[in-house]
Amino acid sequence: MKTYIKILLATCMVATLGSCSLDLQEQFNYKGETYSEEDPFENITAWDYIQSRVSNTPRDANNRFKLQSNTNELGFNGDELDLMIAAIKRVGYEDLYNQTANSGRTYLLLNNNAFTGNNSTRDIVRAIRGSQLADNSTIEPETYFDNWTPEQLNQLKAILRYHIVTDYVEQRTVPTANVFVLFKTLLPKVNLDALGAPVSLSNDMADIAFSRDGDARFTLRVNDVGSPLPATANTANLDESVRRHNYVFNNGIGHYLQEMVRYQPYTLYTNLPLD
C-alpha cells in the first residue's frame, strides 16, 4: 500500500495536550486489509466498491436471505454491505459516495451486522424502528426499506451522513496511541431548547473522534470513552473499534464498522429534514 502521511490541522486539537509538540510514535507502513500488496480499489469510488459487496449466497424462492443460518445454503453474510447499499439507494445518497471532487474523505462502511441485532442504541434497524430483525427471519435487502416512513428515512439519512468524515483518516493521522483527534462529518448538529428538545439543524457539523488502541496500535477506535465529545457520543457501549481498515478509493478511504456510532441521538433528527 502506498505510504500516505497527511498532516492535518486537526492534530492540533488533541485532547489534554497543551501544544502540538508531542513526538510522533514510530511510523509504520500500515497495510489495508484487502489481502493484496497493492490498493486494488484505488481507481474506483467508494460507491463502486460498496455496490460490489453483496452476500454471495443463494436466496430462497422469494429472493430472500436468511438473516442468520447454520447452513451455507441461505446464509446472510454479516460482513457484507447488502443493507448499506439498499439504504443509500433508498435515500438517494449515491452521489455522496460517488463524488470525485474531494478525494480526502473517510467512509465508515456499515456492514450487515450494523443493521441487525438487538441493541436499541447501536443496531440501526432496532434503533429506528424499535424492534429487531429476528434470528432466522428472511429479508430481501433491495426492498427492505421501501415501506419506511419519511421520519424513519430521515434518521437513516442522519446515520449515513455521520459516517462520512470530511478528512482522510488512517492510523498515521493519529499521532500516538490513546490520544483523540477530532474531525467533522457531513451531519449537522441539532440545536436544542432549554428542555433538550430539537429545534433546528445547526450550521456546525457534528464531530467524530478517532484514536489508536493502546494495546493494538494498528486498530483505530471511534468515539472512544474519554474523547472530547458530549456524553451522547462517548459513553461506554457507544464507542466502536474499526473492524477492517484502509480500503483506498479514488475519492477517499474506507473502514468497516460492525456497529454505528453517533454524536447526538438520531431520534433528534426525526422531524428535521435532511437533504
Image (spheres, rainbow, N blue to C red):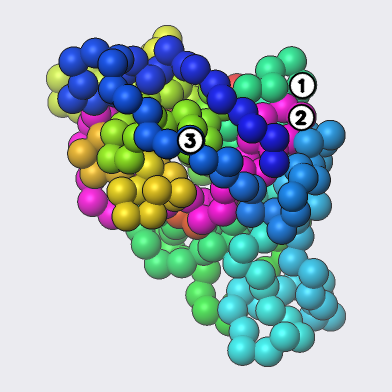
Q: Amino acid at mark 2?
A: Asn
Measured Cα–Cα span from mark 2 to mark 3:
24 Å
Nearer-N-terminus badge (1/2): 1
Picture quadrant where residue 36 is located: bottom right
Q: Are marks 1 and 2 in contact (CB under 8 Å)?
A: yes
Indicate which disc residue 27 carries.
3
Nearer-N-terminus badge (3/1): 3
In this orientation, does residue 27 appear?
A: yes
Instruction: Residue 213: give x, y in percent of width and height.
Output: 35, 48
Indicate which disc residue 250 carries.
2
Q: Nearer the viewer, residue 147 or 231?
A: 231
Per the rendered image, the range of residues in magenta is 228-257
Q: Which residue is mark 1?
A: 100
Instruction: State the residue lying farthest toward the bottom.
Output: 71
Instruction: Residue 275: give x, y in percent of width and height.
Output: 60, 22
Instruction: State the residue lying farthest toward the front.
Output: 26
Q: Amino acid at mark 3?
A: Gln
Measured along the vertical axis of the image, is residue 232 above or below residue 197? below
Dot 2 alpha-carbon crowd within 10 angstroms: few under 14, some 14 to 19, many 20 or more: some
